[in-house]
Amino acid sequence: MLRIGIVGLGLIGGSLGLDLRAKGHYVVGVSRRAETYERAIAKGAVDWGSTEPAVLSALDLVFLCPPIGSILSVALEIVPHLSRDTVLTDVGSVKESIVPALEKLWPRYVGGHPMAGTAAAGIEAAQSQLFANAPYVLTPTLHTDGEAIDCVAQVINDLGAKLLYATPADHDRAVAWISHLPVMVSAALLLANTQEANEPIRTLSQRLASSGFRDTSRVGGGNPKLGRMMAEYNRAALRHCIIHYRATLDHLLQQIEQEDWAGLEANLAVAQAYRQQIYP
Ligand code: NAP
């Protein structure tokens, strides 16, 4: 049983708390607003909560779970209260803009990113088993303390997540492809649909939208603040992916314009095979 702190009790922080408590760990939560930790206690996501970072002293492990743009400022606020041996980790969706700064700040820090989420935000959205069978990436560097890695790895295994390792730079390039680009593509799909000038057609398309549109629009209909932060903090990698995606879309458009049906089908067959490779 570990004594674990969670700072930022939203979807990810609250969901971590639910599962960590279920595994028998003692969980202390810190939020900016008292209502948030009170709801977290009521939901069973933390054993105890406070708005004061001083409650994080004498813990084994602390998860930083605020929005990406606040991770560094929140870390600066809490580290004076941590015990020397406390391991610190964060759940931010980007790593290159976070890891170098945090590892300078705290010697027992290891970056992390659970590849799990929903379209909702806040403590009410927290749910148990969110991380089970989902990938969870740790991004240690040459400077990362080995015991800190082992400690976080053990807790990730406890959550039933699939543990992976990557450098912060490789992580950011990979998540740009499979997480950040899909948010922009899916949002573009929704935005383009809103721009259909023929109102009856737009209304009919909404009424006809079924499981296919539900799947393809899901990530674009998520938390706008999170999407903005993905773009802001992973700008170069996301730009690279969008440029390649746009060129691919242009190529498909060209095949349609030229009525190159065989070429289009061949490309769609490559897409189908690649998806089957990822999700056998
Ligand atoms: P969320 O549901 O909006 O929760 C964030 C929580 O942080 C809020 O409940 C808020 O509670 C607190 N907070 C907000 N601003 C803060 C600030 N300036 N300082 C301190 N605390 C603040 O967001 P989330 O989806 O859990 O995301 C949290 C982190 O997880 C982000 O870094 C994100 O990159 C990462 N992540 C998200 C997903 C996803 O799909 N959602 C997946 C993987 C990783 P109070 O206002 O009460 O303090």
Image (spheres, grey):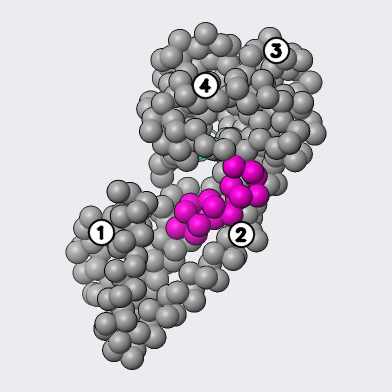
Label 1 crowding class (10 Å Cα cut-off): few <14, some 14-19, many 20+?
few
Precedes in sequence: disc 4 or disc 3: 3
Precedes in sequence: disc 1 or disc 2: 1
Q: Is mark 2 within 8 Å of ligand 1?
A: no
Ligand 1 resides in the quarter of the picture at top right
Residue 242's spot in the image, x, y percent? 53, 67
The image quadrant of residue 63 is top right
Q: Distance from label 4 to label 2 (Cα)?
A: 30 Å
Residue type beneath disc 4: Val
Label 3 crowding class (10 Å Cα cut-off): few <14, some 14-19, many 20+?
some
Q: Which residues are magenta?
A: 166-182
Q: Is residue 173 visible?
A: yes
Residue type beneath disc 2: Ala
Q: Secondary structure at mark 3?
A: loop
Precedes in sequence: disc 3 or disc 2: 3
Q: Disc count in the image? A: 4
Q: Distance from label 4 to label 3 (Cα)?
A: 19 Å
Label 2: which residue?
Answer: 237
Q: Is residue 40 visible?
A: no
Label 4: which residue?
Answer: 155
Residue type beneath disc 1: Gly
Indicate left or right for 222 with 91 as reference: left
